[in-house]
Amino acid sequence: MCVSAYAKVLPSRIIDTHTEITSMQQSNEKLYVCTSQGEVQVYALDTLKFLQRIDIPSYTDLFGFVFRPKVFNTDVNANAEILIVAAGVNGSRSLYVYANENLQVLLEGMSIAKALWVSQTQVLVALMSHEILLFDTQQKKILYQTQVTQASFSDMVYNAHDHIVYTTGESGVVYAIDPSNGKILGHYDMINKDKIFALGFGGDSLVGAGQDKRLSIYRFQNGSKLLDSAMVRSEFLVYAAGIDTKGEYIGYMSDENGSVQILRAKDKKPLVVLEGILGVVNSIIFYGTNVFVSCDDSKIYVFNLQGVL
């Protein structure tokens, strides 16, 4: 469909997962949906067919109550091995790997915030304190652990082409890090002056969703040399942002109603507004001419932007 510059678009399809969604990730033509009730649901991105459910074991608290763990995020490597970060006992979190229909614990009893594959056998783990550690899945050991900053952690993304990880937190500063040794290659503080809720990376560009109602856009050469930066002001706190894999289109939560503004990255031109999302957005994923959005309810909102993207 052809859509004018400020057109409002409603979902072409809504998928009900029947449990609250905490985040979504895409990999290998699949959509991985994390939920608050101890499961990861997997869908085919092309057909939206439900493919698989991965269940995380329940845990028992000090009073004997049994809980389904909240699942926070996933990441998948080229071998289809799935990292899963989920809640554990006494407020801790556990890191699992799911492969060949087998779920295995890699780390537990830690304040794990996020984990990403940085090679086929090594995982970069971010703690809520904004420490990072490199874990080798073959050696079953932590290779290093270092403190990035005293500001608490909020998000981390991986630039596979340049082998660089970007982290951020409550300060609004973005750090470029060499995951092989934890060395900070650069820090970028010219846009956000308060917490960045979420990061997204595509092409050579990084986007940040700011509590200060600012969407930050950084463009890099070789992953850490800053080429330019830009800011887009929002009417509301920017709780979520996403960018397509080529870095051509950006989406961000733009108002208190959960609407998502789609921009063209090269000139920041607004294209369309996605509406009909009934909650605070937590994930925005571009795939072909579709945009997938989730929020703090049970629905996956699918928007067909053929003629726009």
Image (cartoon, rainbow, N blue to C red):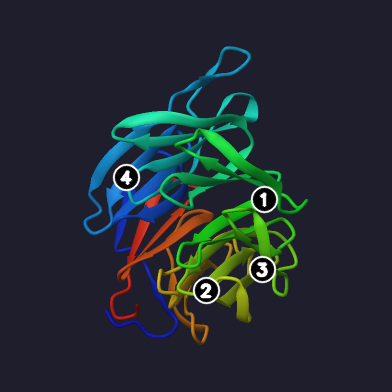
Q: Which mark is residue 153?
A: 1
User: Secondary structure beneath disc 3?
Assistant: loop
Q: CA distance from mark 4 to mark 1?
A: 27 Å
Q: Amino acid at mark 3?
A: Lys
Relative height, residue 5 to residue 17 (above, below): below
Q: Which residue is mark 4?
A: 42
Contact flag, marks 4 and 1 (Cβ < 8 Å): no
Considering only order in the chain, which callout, 1 or 4, is on the residue closer to the N terminus?
A: 4
Q: Tag 4 or tag 2, which sits nearer the N-term?
A: 4
* Label 1: how many Cα within 10 Å (few below 14, some 14–19, many 20+): many
Q: Is residue 57 above or below residue 206?
A: above
In the image: residue 19, left or right of residue 28: right
Of all residues shown, which one is farthest toward the top? 64
* Comparing labels 2 and 4, the label whose residue is closer to the camera: 2
On the picture, is 36 further left or further right than 305?
right
Judging by the rendered image, the residue that carries numbered circle 2 is 205
Residue 127 in picture, x, y percent from top left: 64, 43
Amino acid carrying label 4: it is Val
**Looking at the image, do the residues carrying marks 2 and 4 touch, with CB atoms under 8 Å apart?**
no
Q: Secondary structure at mark 1?
A: strand
Residue 224, quarter of the rendered image: bottom right
Amino acid type for the residue under numbered disc 2: Ser
- Residue at the disc numbered 3: 213
Near-viewer residue (171 or 175):
175
Q: CA distance from mark 3 to mark 1?
A: 19 Å
The Cα–Cα distance between marks 4 and 3, rounded to whole angstroms, is 32 Å
* Whether residue 87 can be seen here: yes
